[in-house]
Image (cartoon, rainbow, N blue to C red):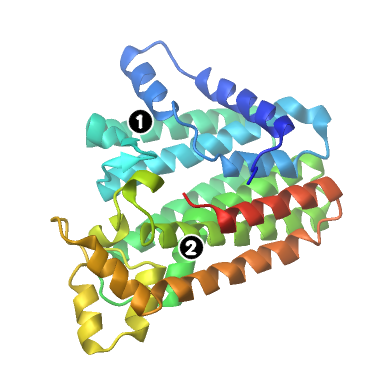
Amino acid sequence: MKLINNSYKKELQLVNRLIKSEIINETVIQELYDYIFKKNGKQLRPLLSLIASSPDKRKTSKRVQIAAIIELLHTATLVHDDVVDESPLRRGAKTINNFWTNSHGVLMGDFIYSKAFMLMVDLSNLKILNELSKATNDISKGELIQLDLVGKKEVTLDELLQISYFKTGRLFEASAKCGAILVNENDKKYISNVSSFAKNLGIAFQIKDDMLDYSQSSKHIGKPTLQDLREGKITYPLYFAMKAADTNDKRFLQSFLGVQTKYNTSIVLEKIEALGGNHKTEELLLNYIQKSKKLANKIENKQVREEMLNLSKFSYERTK
């Protein structure tokens, strides 16, 4: 399905141009920056801010600046995540920590963060600065919570949902909220509706990511199959499968947590499927998609409402 209208494609091109204009004349930084931003991904977060701020097209330069800040923040978290998780691939290409070193990944992530905060200060909007700084703090909090759960053989659904919110839902929420604040910081109803919509969409997006890790080939999604399982992370399909499993099946599934050596992934995928792990995850996904649609329908601006509903549909149907 079509994710982006032509008008937003043009604005995202301006966002990417602004991001790339932030490169400085140090060869190693230029090489790393070019490598990181050569693939733009789905860019849902900056798109959310552009849609939320679209009722006031007179502020195009500030709208583009906010979207660029959000994409920089998101990219910095991805670079740092790859270092923490020792991930070899991102969007089908070698990660910075794999292509260069962990040190390059940490320092480049810091460099991108600093660029984002420089652009934030330049906006001269304390409400937006406050929201984005809080969101950045919450994202780090989510990473620390998840890190604490790595290797644990039991987690709760509440813990998984908390991680999904902090890791993904929080920046979705902040993206839409900042766009809405730019339009009219006194329109509390509009700000609340688009923010709540984006929060639930972000949680749904993370649930779908976890599903894809257990249902698609590494070539299709751009990362190794069962990467979360190899990293010792329990995500939704495994959680629901273990909840339905008897003692032997549970022990069998837990035995693969954190195992980096090669093994036949199909036996794990088949067991997860047989125990209903994917089915229960899809039910949870649908629940959050429906929540997001309900909130989108409260948005009075027709164009914004339809664009947000389109994002809900895309997030549910996407295959990578």
The x and y percentages for residue 21 are 53, 17
Crowding at mark 1 (Cα within 10 Å: few <14, some 14-19, many 20+): many
Q: Amino acid at mark 2?
A: Ile
The x and y percentages for residue 171 are 56, 50
> In the image, 319: left or right of 195?
left
> In the image, 29: left or right of 18?
left
The x and y percentages for residue 180 are 75, 46
Tell which of 308 and 53 is nearer to you.
308
Tell which of 49 and 304 is nearer to you.
304
Residue position marked by numbered label 1 in the rendering: 108
How far is mark 2 from mark 1, CA to CA?
28 Å
Q: Residue at x 54, y 67 (%)?
A: 285
The x and y percentages for residue 280 are 47, 76
Residue 124 shows up from this direction: no
Q: Residue at x 27, y 89 (%)?
A: 246
Q: Residue furthest left?
A: 261
Tell me the mark number nearer the camera, choosing from 2 and 1: 2
Kindly indicate the quadrant of the structure image that contains residue 245.
bottom left
Tell which of 9 and 317 is nearer to you.
317
User: Which disc number belongs to residue 41?
Assistant: none
Q: Amino acid at mark 1?
A: Met
Residue 226, placed above or below residue 122 = below
Crowding at mark 2 (Cα within 10 Å: few <14, some 14-19, many 20+): many
> In the image, 165: left or right of 256?
right
Q: Residue at x 45, y 56 (%)?
A: 209
Disc on the earlier residue, 2 or 1 = 1
Residue 32, placed above or below residue 183 = above
Residue 209, placed above or below residue 39 = below
User: Which disc number belongs to residue 207?
Assistant: 2
Q: Residue furthest top?
A: 25
